[in-house]
Amino acid sequence: QDVYIHKLRNRKIQPRNYTVVLSLDGFRYDYQDIALTPNLDTLSAKGVRAEALIPSFPTLTFANHYTLATGLLPENHGIVANNFVDRKLNMAYRIHDRKSVTDSRFYSGEPIWVTAESQRIRSGVCMWVGCDSEHKGYRPSKWQSYSKSVPYTTRIDSVVQWLSQPYNQRPHLAMCYIEEADEVGHTYGPDSPAIKAAIERTDSIIGYFVKQLNSLSFSDSINLIIVSDHGMAQVDTSHVVRLENYVKEDWLDTLICSPAISFAYCTKNGADLLLNAISNVDGLKAWKRSDIPAKYHISNNIRVGDVLILSESCRSQTFRPNRQLPKGVHGYDADDQLMHGIFYAIGPDFKSGYKVPALYNVDLYELMCSLLCIQPAKTDGSLERIKCVLNQ
């Protein structure tokens, strides 16, 4: 706490810098190295690049975006997947259901924009998970709900417009979300020629963002961080586990099934029957919630169901006979290198031309609090692990 008090006092001499965060959904740790990325190359040369950003488990979009925002593991912030059931609320959380994604009862912890707003620091958040739900009585000063139809440059223009407002109205924290690499990765796979074009389009978007930020009169006071929530794996479409061949529906209340990971909410005795049926199925691992290995940090939340079914890397599962499966998948074990994302940073508070080993995404919240000179909430992250990227 003394560190933050010291920074608050120093603010009289040195004004607080701005923190801008851009998330590139599904942008794998090695994508810069397989395509032409002049803008990321410049960021690497002039700022900080991590070898990877290690996600939290499960390596899914909503779980990890909310981890990035809160510094909490999914079992503690409650968004344990893109879709899940909360039996206490008797409700399902589904990413395409506006009613559920804006329901504050699903969200625990304190996202960075709430930490900022509660300490009188304005924030502007464009399409980040949880930004359009009220938390502890706070919302961002400016926010934009997710809409796939809004072009990426328009999203960036919104953020820059917020930053262009008079000093006492503009946010000191701005966050923006872009999904180009994720969409192409799912459709064509990360080993396809299409992903190279998507990487280069994404790099152009970064270039546009940097140019717009540099046009601001206070551009030398902006710290820009670029991250991703997870990577992507090319799946072996010849090895798909068809769960319907093993699982009887009367064992289940609900099965939330995705190619990499499924949550089974079982009827009485259904969990044991389900585990017995799939225990020797090639390409799968499965556990009762209480038996999930500790390294996954997920067993303490009942939203993951009674049985967790995890596909082995590059394999997939389905519970619908006619479902068309994606060619690129994420959601696997966070230790799987193919699931690792990116971290780049540039600005007055960051080192220059500095490459660091892999960082953990659960530490980003603490880093943002440090940059904004605000007191963090309790988290699962560590400033000590990530402060090596800072000048001081």
Image: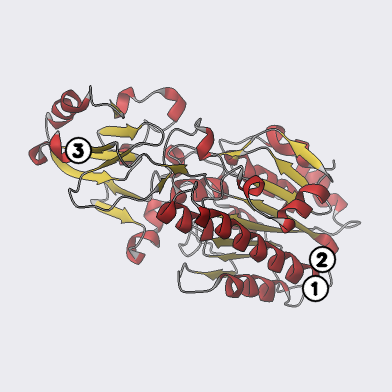
Residue with the mark numbered 2 = 219
Ranked by sequence position, the earlier of labels 2 and 3 is 2
Between the residue at mark 1 and the residue at mark 3, the CA separation in whole angstroms equals 54 Å
Do tag 1 and tag 2 residues touch (Cβ < 8 Å)? yes
Ranked by sequence position, the earlier of labels 1 and 3 is 1
Between the residue at mark 1 and the residue at mark 2, the CA separation in whole angstroms equals 7 Å
Q: Secondary structure at mark 3?
A: helix
201 or 289: nearer the viewer: 201
Q: Answer above or below: position of 364 versus 152.
A: above
Q: Check the picture and name the quadrant holding the C terminus.
A: top right
Identify residue type, mark 1.
Ser
Tell me: 146 left or right of 90. right
Identify residue type, mark 2.
Ser
- What crowding class fits label 1: few (fewer than 14 Cα within 10 Å), some (14-19), or many (20 or more)? few
Which residue sits furthest right? 13
Q: Is residue 120 something that shows in the picture?
A: yes
Which residue sits furthest front? 193
Residue with the mark numbered 3 = 243
Quadrant housing residue 246: top left
Which residue is located at x 67 percent, y 37 percent?
A: 51
Q: Position of residue 47 (x, y in %)?
A: 80, 48
Q: Nearer the viewer, mark 1 or mark 3?
A: 3
Which residue is located at x 58 percent, y 71 percent?
A: 155
Q: Position of residue 132 (x, y in %)?
A: 47, 65
Q: How is the image coloured?
A: secondary structure
Q: Is residue 373 something that shows in the picture?
A: no
Which residue is located at x 50 percent, y 49 percent?
A: 66
Tell me: 157 left or right of 268. right
Identify residue type, mark 3.
Leu
